[in-house]
Image (cartoon, rainbow, N blue to C red):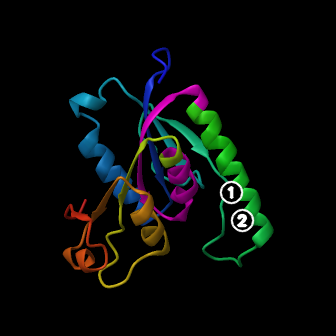
Amino acid sequence: MNMDKPKTVVFVYGEGGHSAQMARLFACLQHHSELSSCKFVTLNDTDKCFSPQGAERVLLQQVRSKYGSFSVLKAISSVGSALFSVVALMGRLDCRILISTGPGIAIVPALMFRLMGRQVIHVETWSRFNTCSFSGKVMYRLSTKFYVQNKEQLRRYPKAVWSGRL
């Protein structure tokens, strides 16, 4: 890790409930003494998401629209663009930790962080009780720490940590 690059925490999340969860999580973390000297970067696929004051925002291409059909070519293009963006970000900054509240947009950056030996923290959505989200299933395997907000999820994710609601 380069001493000339600022220590950076990367937040990855989508719009709606994922953004609302991250806003609450960020409010809890922003005054933490270990993070006081860190730079914050957000990775989103829309500018409708919460953005912490002073954070750098990186917009990624949407893999799929919630309201449209799935396109293999668009998905491949989005994954390639995300890879490029994350590699460029990690080359420019000392990215230490990735924190995600989902959705699937977090998978490619999380994979890159793990391949580079960095920490990945995922908080499974508060709307899940008895089923697993697609991103949760993948992030459970990629994350160094995996949190659930509903105790019922501990049956689905036995190695998870119950955090309670944000």
Q: Which amino acid does label 2 sit on?
A: Ala
* Residue 94 among magenta residues: yes
User: Label 1 belongs to which residue?
Assistant: 79
The residue located at (65%, 50%) in the rendering is 82
The residue located at (34%, 75%) in the rendering is 127
Left or right of 114 in this view: 67: right
* Residue 41 among magenta residues: no
The residue located at (76%, 71%) in the rendering is 72
Vertical relation: 113 (above or below) 146: above
Vertical relation: 100 (above or below) 51: below
User: Label 2 belongs to which residue?
Assistant: 75
Q: What residue type is labelled 1?
A: Val
Q: Position of residue 64 (x, y in %)?
A: 66, 69
Q: Distance between the residues labelled 1 and 2?
A: 6 Å
Q: Do the residues labelled 1 and 2 touch (CB within 8 Å)?
A: yes
In this view of the protein, which residue sits in the foreground, 90 or 1?
1
Q: In which quarter of the image is residue 96?
A: top left
Left or right of 84 in this view: 144: left
Tell me which segment is drawn in magenta. Answer: 91-113
